[in-house]
Image (tube, rainbow, N blue to C red):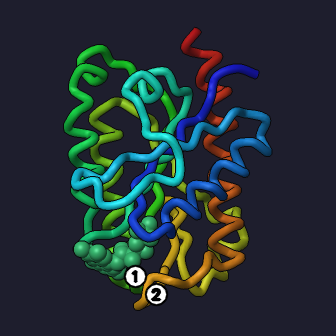
C-alpha cells in the first residue's frame, strides 16, 4: 500500500479539526496513510492544530477530504482563497480522477450544513476529482439526531460552538475515511 489520503481543513474553534481526526482514523483503519493538514487563517488569528498544507502535498495525494466550518451558509473565505491559489495544479490536471469528499461543522442543525457541503464540492469538481459521500448502507445515517449527511460527514456544534461530536457523527466520519481510503487505492491502480 502506498501513497496517502490528504485530510485538508480549516477550523477556528476545533469542531472541523475534530472531524478531521476521526476521518484520519478511518483512513488508517483501511491501511492507508492519513496526512492531516490545515489551511491557515488569512488573518493569522489562530494557530493550526496540524501542519499547514503545501501545494505539493495536495498535488501528490491519492485522495482528498476537504473540511470547512459553515460561514453564512458557505465555506469559510480562507478555504475559498486556498482553492483560488491552486490554478497551477488545475492547469496540470494534478487532481483529475482522484477521489474526494467534503465535511463541515455548523452551529445550528439547519444553519446551512448541507448547502455548505454541496458548495464545497464545486472546486473539487472543477479539478476533475471524483466525489464520494456516505451511502445509506451506514446505519448511523438513518438514526443521527445531529450531523452526518449523505453529502459528507458533519457536526452540529451548538449555539456556543462547544458540543462534542456525537457517536453517530464520529462513526460516520470514520466510515467516510475508510471509504475514501479504499477508493483511493482502487483508483490509483488505474492511474499507474
Ligand atoms: C462568521 C461566522 C458565520 C457563521 N455562519 C453560520 C451559519 O451560517 N450557520 C450555522 O449553523 N453556523 C454558522 N456559524 C457557526 C460555525 O459554523 C460553527 O461554530 C462551527 O462549528 C465552527 O467550526 P470550527 O469549530 O471548526 O471553527 C458561523 C460562525 C461564524 C464565526
135 displayed left or right of 139: left
Q: Secondary structure at mark 2?
A: loop
| Label 2 CB-ligand 1 distance < 8 A | yes
Could you say which disc has been placed on residue 158 in the image?
A: 2
Q: Residue at x 32, y 64 (%)?
A: 116
Q: Which residue is mark 1?
A: 107
Q: Residue at x 53, y 47 (%)?
A: 50
Task: Tell me the crowding category of disc 1: few under 14, some 14 to 19, or many 20 or more residues within 10 angstroms, Cα based.
Answer: many
115 displayed left or right of 189: left
Front-most of residues 186 and 79 = 79
Q: Residue at x 43, y 29 (%)?
A: 58
Residue 96 seen in the current view = no
Task: Tell me the crowding category of disc 2: few under 14, some 14 to 19, or many 20 or more residues within 10 angstroms, Cα based.
Answer: some
Q: Quadrant holding ligand 1?
A: bottom left
- The answer to whether the residue labelled 2 contacts the one labelled 1, judged by CB atoms less than 8 Å apart, is yes
Residue 167 coordinates in the image, percent (x, y): 71, 76
Rendered view: 58 above or below 60: below
| Label 1 CB-ligand 1 distance < 8 A | yes
Front-most of residues 138 and 89 = 89
Could you say which disc has been placed on residue 121 in the image?
A: none
The quadrant in which the N terminus is found is top right
12 displayed left or right of 100: left
Residue 118 coordinates in the image, percent (x, y): 34, 59
Q: Residue at x 42, y 61 (%)?
A: 11
As measured in the structure, the alpha-carbon distance from the residue carrying label 2 to the one carrying label 1 is: 5 Å
Amino acid at each position: 500500500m502506498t501513497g496517502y489520503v490528504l485530510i485538508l481543513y480549516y477550523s477556528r474553534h476545533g469542531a472541523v479539526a475534530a472531524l478531521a481526526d476521526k476521518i484520519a482514523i478511518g483512513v488508517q483503519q483501511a491501511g492507508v496513510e492519513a496526512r492531516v493538514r490545515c489551511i491557515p487563517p488569512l488573518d493569522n488569528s489562530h494557530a493550526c492544530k496540524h501542519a499547514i498544507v503545501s501545494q505539493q502535498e495536495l498535488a501528490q495525494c491519492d485522495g482528498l477530504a476537504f473540511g470547512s466550518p459553515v460561514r453564512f451558509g458557505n465555506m469559510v473565505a480562507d478555504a475559498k482563497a486556498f482553492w483560488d491559489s491552486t490554478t497551477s495544479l488545475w492547469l496540470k490536471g494534478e487532481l483529475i480522477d482522484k477521489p474526494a469528499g467534503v465535511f463541515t461543522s455548523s452551529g445550528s442543525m439547519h444553519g446551512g450544513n448541507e448547502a455548505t457541503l454541496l458548495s464545497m464540492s464545486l472546486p473539487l469538481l472543477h479539478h476533475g476529482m471524483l466525489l464520494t459521500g456516505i451511502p445509506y448502507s451506514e446505519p448511523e445515517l438513518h438514526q443521527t439526531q445531529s450531523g452526518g449527511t449523505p453529502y459528507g460527514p458533519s457536526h452540529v456544534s451548538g449555539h456556543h460552538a462547544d458540543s462534542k461530536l456525537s457517536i453517530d457523527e464520529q462513526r460516520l466520519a470514520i466510515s467516510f475515511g475508510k471509504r475514501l481510503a479504499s477508493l483511493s487505492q482502487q483508483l490509483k491502480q488505474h492511474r499507474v
